[in-house]
Structures are given as C-alpha cells and as structure tokens.
Image (tube, helix red, strand yellow):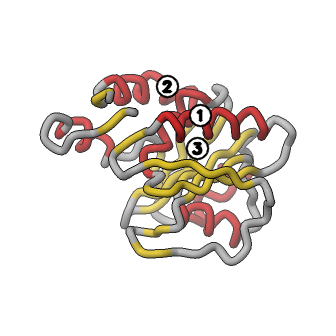
Amino acid sequence: MLRLDAELNKDIIIELKKPLGKLYPDFEDAIDEIKSSKFLISVGDATFSNLLEHEIYPNLAIIDNLIQRQNHNHDVIHTENILKANNPAGCITDDLWETIGKALRLCDNGECYVIDVAGEEDLAVLPCILMASEDTTILYGQPNEGLVILKVSDTKDKAQTLIDAFIEE
C-alpha cells in the first residue's frame, strides 16, 4: 500500500491539489473534447454523474458514492459490470491497483465498467495514468473549480514522480 503523510508529503499534497491536465470551469465546454476521446476513464462521482446526464458512458468509471465528502447515490449506473475495491483516504491500496488493472483488461471488450470504492477514490487517477494506454483520456473533478481532462501520454512521467514520493507500507 502507498500512503501520503500530511507532514512528510506536504509538497506532494500541494502538487496533487493542482490540475494534472486542462481545467474546464464549465463541464459543457469540455463535451466536444470528451466525445472525441478514444478511451475514457472518469474518476469521481460528480464527473460520472455529469457524463451520465449528457449520455456519455466512459469505458471505466471509479466512484466512492461521495461528492465533496457528502453521500451520493447514483440512481442509474448503466452497467452491471461493477467491481469493488477498498481504498482508505490518502492511500493507494494494492486492492485498488489490482482492480483498476482488471477493469482495464475487461474494458477491452467495449463495455463500461464501474469500480465502486469503499473509502476514497481521489488518488485513483495516478494508477489509472500509469496503467492505461497512451491514448486514454482521464476526467476528474477539481473541487470547487471544475473538470480536469488529461491525456495519459502527457502525464505518465508526472504521475510516476508523484507516486514515487508516497510512503510504501
């Protein structure tokens, strides 16, 4: 398991609060770019909800049923392909890594998969970047700022640098 420590990883935590890709304050402004994506991963409940409202179905969605720490229940998830993973806040567990890897392999069949995380999914963006193919687009919410769209090919080195700074337990 990899963990962030509030004292030891202050610089990394500050870095993780910055968008890893292009920030769109308004979700609607990003729709054309989202629709042009060859392979799409969404991380976060608000991002997934916005996609579903626009009838856009990602190849993989990672949710924890919370939006800004408030309970959120998806009325309709549009897939029966739901995987489960455990991942406490501030961590990236082996379970999350393995479940993302499994989901990425399964997504090759063209179906949508959802990973339902018990705990917190915020840091799942990093293993997604490191495991997804170069032509993957990842979406996630930047709290109180908007939607971030990143291209895996542009962020692999940055993601690896961030991951390397985590504490391994």
Q: CA distance from mark 2 to mark 3?
A: 12 Å
Q: Residue at x 86, y 39 (%)?
A: 109
**Which residue in the protein does label 1 denote?**
98
In front: mark 3 or mark 1? 1
Mark linked to residue 156? 2
| Amino acid marked by disc 3 | Ile
How far, Cα to Cα, is label 3 from label 1?
18 Å
Whichever of labels 2 and 1 marks the residue nearer the N terminus, that label is 1
Q: Which mark is residue 138?
A: 3
Give yes or no for contact between labels 2 and 3 (Cβ–Cβ under 8 Å): no
Which amino acid lies under the numbered mark 1 shown in the image of this protein? Glu
Q: In front here: 166 or 54?
A: 166
| Residue type pointed to by label 2 | Lys
Callout 1 secondary element: helix
Q: Find the distance from the CA under tag 2 to the CA under tag 1.
A: 18 Å
Q: Is residue 60 above or below residue 163?
A: below
